[in-house]
Amino acid sequence: MPDTSSTEAGNRQVPPLPRPGLAASNSGVRLRPALGVWLRDLIVSLAISAFIIVFIYQPVKVEGTSMMPSLADQERIFVNKFVYRLEPISRGDVVVFRYPRDPSKSYIKRVIGVAGDRIRIDGGQVYVNGVALDEDYVPPAYADSRSYPETVVPPQCYLVLGDHRSMSNDSRDFGPVNQSYIYGKAVFGYWPMDKLGRVR
């Protein structure tokens, strides 16, 4: 009797049945390269993130109310640590620096005067080189009436003030800040979500 298990109409060959364990073996071969690619991508991503955090952007938590309403207590922001290698520190920049009286602490304030500027404060009104400074970032509720005698900002130094003038320990108390103490510019707020955006 002819063997009919290997033939069909038209003499087509019937494919052999797969051997047990063959499919599992092939899937294992496919999984290993996929896992290697995933691990490689993860390591590269972590390395790039570490480079950005260490050399360019650093996440910082604001502590205190001296920069309200621009920056609130416990707000999270990114500080650009590289930008001042490319451009000078300017009036209006919100900078992070080591506190001159205790370099283990960091402060965040706004630059009001740069080297060579003549700064005075008369009843809360700031004058830069004899011109009244328009400070729309200081609402009336956050202003105060303190005065500060005219001073010339020394070379490589900056005069900094908090936006919440009545609650800020700043250059009115500890004087101008040397450039070597300033290590970053506040650029972007990311938490809470309603404060998401560029720091102004």
Image (cartoon, rainbow, N blue to C red):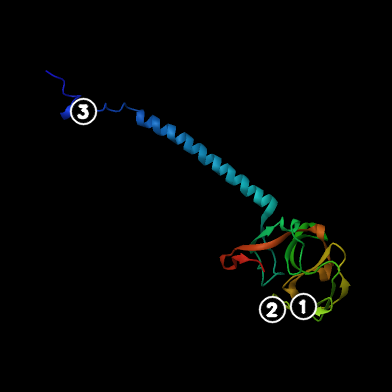
Task: Classify residue 125 by image quadrant.
Answer: bottom right
Which circle marks residue 133 in the picture? 1
Taking the image as drawn, is residue 8 in sight?
A: no
Dot 2 or dot 3, earlier in sequence: 3
Packing grade of label 1 (10 A; few <14, some 14-19, many >=20) is: few
| Foreground label between 2 and 3 | 3
The alpha-carbon separation of the residues under discs 1 and 2 comes to 14 Å
Dot 1 or dot 2, earlier in sequence: 1
Amino acid on which the number 1 mark rests in the picture: Leu
Task: Classify residue 178 by image quadrant.
Answer: bottom right
Indicate the secondary structure of the residue bearing disc 2.
loop
Q: Residue furthest front?
A: 10
Q: Residue furthest left?
A: 1
Indicate the secondary structure of the residue bearing disc 3.
loop
**What residue would you read off at disc 3?**
12
The alpha-carbon separation of the residues under discs 2 and 3 comes to 89 Å
The alpha-carbon separation of the residues under discs 3 and 1 comes to 93 Å
Packing grade of label 2 (10 A; few <14, some 14-19, many >=20) is: few
Which circle marks residue 164 in the picture? none
Q: Position of residue 55 (x, y in %)?
A: 70, 51
**What residue would you read off at disc 2?**
139
Q: Position of residue 21 (x, y in %)?
A: 35, 28
Indicate the secondary structure of the residue bearing disc 1.
loop
